[in-house]
Image (spheres, rainbow, N blue to C red):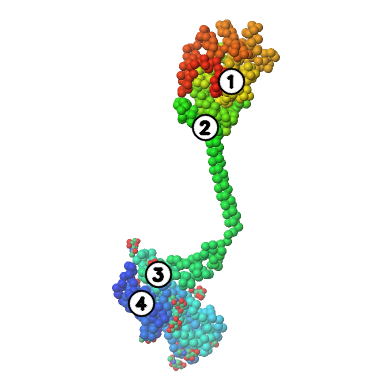
Amino acid sequence: MEKMKLQEGLIFVAIFFLAYTQQLVGGQPQPHEGCQTRCGNVTIEYPFGTSPRCYYAEDPSFKLTCNETEKLLFGNIPAINISHNGELRVRVPPSYSCYNSRGNSSGSLYHTIRLVNLSLSTKNRFTAVGCNTYAFLSTYGVANHSFGCMSMCDSPPEANGECSGKGCCESSVPRGSNFFGVQPYSFNNNTSVHSFNPCSYAFLVENGTFNFDALEDLKNLRNVTDFPVVLDWSIGKQTCEQVGNTSICGGNSTCFDSTRGVGYNCKCFEGFEGNPYLSYGCHDIDECTSSRHNCSDPNTCRNKVGGFYCKCQSGYHLDTNTMNCKRKDVGWTIILLGTIIGFLVILLVVSFIKQKMKHHKNTELRQKFFEQNGGGMLIQRLSGAGPANVDVKIFTEVGMKEATNGYDKSRILGQGGQGTVYKGILPDNSIVAIKKARLGDNSQVEQFINEVLVLSQINHRNVVKLLGCCLETEIPLLVYEYITSGTLFDHLHGSLFDSSLTWEHRLRIAIEVAGTLAYLHSSASIPIIHRDVKTANILLDENLTAKVADFGASRLIPMDKEQLTTMVQGTLGYLDPEYFNTGLLNEKSDVYSFGVVLMELLSGQTALCFERPQTSKHLVSYFASAMKENRLHEIIDGQVMTEENQREIHEAARVAVECTRVTGEERPRMKEVAAELEALRVKTTKFKRSDQYPETEEIENLLGVQILTTQGDTSSTGYDSINNVPILDIEAGR
Ligand SMILES: *[C@@H]1O[C@H](CO)[C@@H](O)[C@H](O)[C@H]1NC(C)=O
Ligand SMILES: *[C@@H]1O[C@H](CO)[C@@H](O)[C@H](O)[C@H]1NC(C)=O
Ligand SMILES: *[C@@H]1O[C@H](CO)[C@@H](O)[C@H](O)[C@H]1NC(C)=O
Ligand SMILES: *[C@@H]1O[C@H](CO)[C@@H](O)[C@H](O)[C@H]1NC(C)=O
Ligand SMILES: *[C@@H]1O[C@H](CO)[C@@H](O)[C@H](O)[C@H]1NC(C)=O
Ligand SMILES: *[C@@H]1O[C@H](CO)[C@@H](O)[C@H](O)[C@H]1NC(C)=O
Ligand SMILES: *[C@@H]1O[C@H](CO)[C@@H](O)[C@H](O)[C@H]1NC(C)=O
Ligand SMILES: *[C@@H]1O[C@H](CO)[C@@H](O)[C@H](O)[C@H]1NC(C)=O
Ligand SMILES: *[C@@H]1O[C@H](CO)[C@@H](O)[C@H](O)[C@H]1NC(C)=O
Ligand SMILES: *[C@@H]1O[C@H](CO)[C@@H](O)[C@H](O)[C@H]1NC(C)=O
Ligand SMILES: *[C@@H]1O[C@H](CO)[C@@H](O)[C@H](O)[C@H]1NC(C)=O
Ligand SMILES: *[C@@H]1O[C@H](CO)[C@@H](O)[C@H](O)[C@H]1NC(C)=O
């Protein structure tokens, strides 16, 4: 290595230290205007420059010169081009060492290049050419090291363009090398080799730019003036992280660490171009006008900041494989889906409309029923001249449905030929009995409404109170107070209750019922004939107080004979035979029925019993014959008869028989019956005063009802003496 002659043919890169203040634009050092931007065909860009204030002031190594022959020089090395990403291409001639035929040295050229703030790029290759050659590349710096390659051959190798060891060898260049000398040597002075390879060559060259030609290059490589060599440049000595936002990289650009390992470089963002070392150097690339787009139809190209897109017409979509606009493929799945959705929507709309119509229809229907059932008339009566204090509530159909839990089976209290009674719970938690009333044709509506009004005014302690009605249903509903303890029929004959009614109870019940009927016949504003008095229609509350139920309103019989005669109704066993035969109704029919009830109370036997002998199937005849034959004790309920009350029972039995006389004329009036029974009790009373039958005080409770005190008028009337007085057909609703 002593032979190294560095001084021979040395090219020094002259570095001048020039410190100029620079214009500050956007906080970054910038070149001033009027800097030389071209030298020959090479573009000069900041941070490089040819004059002060044009190159990066803090690093004089960015100074270039452009001499008269339009050659751009880096120091004294010609520069080819400069790239933003930190590469500077220069031209460097090869080193060589030649021998003549005698083995004497006939010429040589050695290069030493010293770089400051730049280094050799690893893109370069160190290459030696020759058949008797070895070459060194030495790097000096923080640490000195040398490396090289050797090539020996007797004859010219075959030319294949590759530098693969035959007449040519190459080696990579270590990163960051910044000071190097290149020198070729010969192993000996063998003249036979010199004949086809007079010289040994060594040079640096950018990878991929040198194709080895064995025949030419072994002879005449000296004729090649230079090879391109890549140098790495960077800003400063710090990494991007270290400089942070004080880097000189401009807007729309980013900093990256230099490949040389020292300093940083800048690059524009994707989709931008320009000089990233200037504050406003990077600008958006208009890909569409610079045809840097891949849209197959340029007309579809649309530029956007940092990129572009291909915009297809509506109805078309971009096929990313061909970048073609294609008509949208409306797949059958979409069609199917669309159809299904459409169908569902239509279904929904239709059902909605149906629902609406149904609702409307329901409302209409309700309204229709309401009118049909005399709702308008009722409201008119209630608000109009009629009694001011009438307490009839008009219930809605919805309210009724809710109260009965949708007319649930479990709510049925009683069911029979005459209708169904439901237990209802009103929103205020009060319990009521709701009965479906039967109404004939429209002509009866007025009377029906009258009847509802009259019944609702009966405020008698022994009458089941009518609370209101619902007219919105086809069959009007009547709402009554709810009585808890069942019917007298159940108590006397039913299995539900053991018949523990004592004589005192029975007598009181009889008095209560008789008094109530008397009141209805004579005292109420319009005489009311119950028409279906029977034990099943007498309810008992928890105190065993009698409550007469079913003041019809179920059907109203106008006072014309035709109707009356066709409408004979009642319950077998209780039915007045006279009424049954003639079809003419009067208050004595109720007297007859009451007589049967009294007989039931006395005997504990049902009104009709087919187990009794033929002649005494009917309780009335059974009772009458027993009375006649003086064997009453046989048929009186054993539970009832005691030593003390024998006389009373006989008296009561007598009254019962009188009540059931065949001709109505012979029967006593209800008021008389009530008085007689009351007298019975008064004689041997063991009851308290409060238990007694309230004679007339209840009448005063009838609010707004015109009380007919002229008893003679009503008491003696049948249907024919007072016109237009409705007589009620009372059905057994329970
Ligand atoms: C620049 O000019 C030189 C001759 O002056 C030529 O050899 C070279 O190819 C040119 N380079 C470019 C990039 O045009
Ligand atoms: C310009 O540079 C070339 C190449 O280095 C050199 O040969 C020439 O002499 C220079 N001219 C001037 C005027 O410096
Ligand atoms: C610089 O020159 C090399 C070779 O002549 C060429 O491959 C490269 O594209 C050039 N770069 C620029 C930025 O002009
Ligand atoms: C070349 O070789 C000849 C003899 O072979 C010798 O006389 C001469 O001095 C040599 N020249 C050099 C420059 O060494
Ligand atoms: C590298 O070599 C040069 C020249 O031979 C010498 O001056 C320098 O001290 C060396 N550096 C190191 C680190 O050995
Ligand atoms: C080849 O010749 C040169 C010049 O005469 C001489 O300096 C060198 O030592 C010779 N080399 C060998 C290997 O003989
Ligand atoms: C020179 O090279 C030839 C061919 O390889 C060889 O035959 C000859 O012996 C060599 N001469 C010397 C002096 O080494
Ligand atoms: C040199 O270039 C070749 C192809 O041109 C490539 O395969 C190889 O990896 C490159 N070597 C280096 C060190 O860049
Ligand atoms: C270049 O090589 C040729 C042979 O191919 C030679 O004749 C010529 O002298 C050489 N020119 C230079 C300047 O070396
Ligand atoms: C190298 O760069 C530093 C700043 O990065 C500068 O101070 C120094 O002057 C530069 N050296 C040369 C020789 O240009
Ligand atoms: C750089 O960043 C620091 C904090 O991260 C901030 O205080 C300073 O203003 C920034 N400088 C510039 C020029 O943006
Ligand atoms: C960055 O690019 C956007 C879009 O081209 C431009 O509006 C903005 O001015 C640029 N910013 C700078 C600092 O150049």
- Lower position in the chain sequence, tag 3 or tag 4: 4
* 1 or 3: mark nearer the eye: 1
- Lower position in the chain sequence, tag 1 or tag 3: 3
Identify the secondary structure beneath mark 3.
strand
* 4 or 2: mark nearer the eye: 2
* 3 or 4: mark nearer the eye: 3
Q: Which residue position holds label 2?
A: 375
Give the CA distance from mark 2 to mark 3.
88 Å
Q: Position of residue 705 (x, y in %)?
A: 47, 22
Q: Which residue position holds label 3?
A: 282
> Residue at (55%, 27%) from the top-left corner?
448
Q: Do the numbered discs 1 and 2 sit on residues whose CB atoms are within 8 Å?
A: no
- Lower position in the chain sequence, tag 2 or tag 3: 3
Q: Do the numbered discs 3 and 4 sit on residues whose CB atoms are within 8 Å?
A: no
Residue type marked 2: Gly
Disc number at residue 531?
1
Give the CA distance from mark 4 to mark 2.
106 Å
Give the CA distance from mark 4 to mark 1.
128 Å
Residue type marked 3: Cys
Residue type marked 1: Arg
* 4 or 1: mark nearer the eye: 1
> Residue at (48%, 12%) from the top-left corner?
688
Visible residue check, residue 396: yes
Q: Is mark 3 within 8 Å of ligand 12?
A: yes
